[in-house]
Amino acid sequence: MSRASPDPLKCGARLKHRRGFCSNTPLDGATRCLWHGGKSTGVKTADGRARVTAGRAAWLDRMRRLKADGKIDRIPGGAKGRSGRPKKSALPSPFKLSSSAPPIARRAMRALAAADAKLPPLPRFPADHPRAGEPIPSGDPAFASLAEPVMVSANLRLALVASHRILTDGCAKFAALDALPDGDPAKDPGQRLKLLRIIQAEAHNAIKLALRVAPETMRPKRSTSQLVELVMRLRAGITEHPRQPD
Ligand SMILES: [Zn+2]
């Protein structure tokens, strides 16, 4: 979805490959530059206008039917929730990564999602339930009525994703230490080992906790952003209190 430029003197179109926003000057009488639709006249004829209206009505009709069938949560670009934010589905996809995740983590997640798609489906609420079609979280009473192997396999899959995420994100953070200049305290082998051990322990924890059959307890105690914070704190600590020579 395009959005208006916050600065009327700039085009503001979003650029590919996260290169930010276009800073070209818009064409006269347009809000976009030559390259981003500034030359477009929009719909000119009454017939064209009618076709746009009919097309939108047909799309809306299709979306309403998909929503009624429970195939989509909400109509894309439709009315927002009361808080002014778009409504979120009750359980985010376990394979969704933050947009700041390193490319290697995204590739690995895609591979995991493909492998997951071949496994038997996760237990979901039945059609007569108000949350029909959503995966059953283990806190829900409905979860307790599932067969034990189903519970364990559902949790184990989420745990694998969680531990995988910790490992890939963590290792990317670890590898980033190489880029620091020589002599940087964070490059100290002892500190690096400490970070590796934290990453390893957290990934391990996610798997161990899966057997407790409660995904909300599988969340790592430290998020990956907290890992970064920890490294930064370690760095700051070492810099403030330089190691005494023996
Ligand atoms: Zn532009």
Image (spheres, helix red, strand yellow):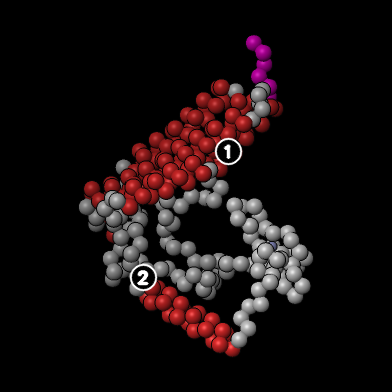
Does ligand 1 reach within 8 Å of label 1's beta carbon? no
- The stretch of residues the image draws in magenta is 241-246
| Residue that label 1 marks | 228
Main SS of the magenta part reads loop
**Amino acid type, callout 2:** Gly
**Above or below 120: residue 2:** below
Q: Which three-letter amino acid code belongs to the residue tagged 1?
A: Val
Quarter-of-image position of residue 43: bottom right
Q: Is residue 92 left or right of residue 235?
A: left
The residue under the point 42% across, 61% down is: 90
Give x and y (percent) for residue 77.
53, 71
Q: Is residue 46 visible?
A: yes
The residue closer to the viewer here, 138 or 1, is: 1
Residue 72, image x, y percentages: 41, 68
Q: Secondary structure at mark 2?
A: loop
Residue sitting farthest toward the bottom: 46
Please give the label number shown on residue 189.
Answer: none
Residue located 49% across and 29% down the image: 196
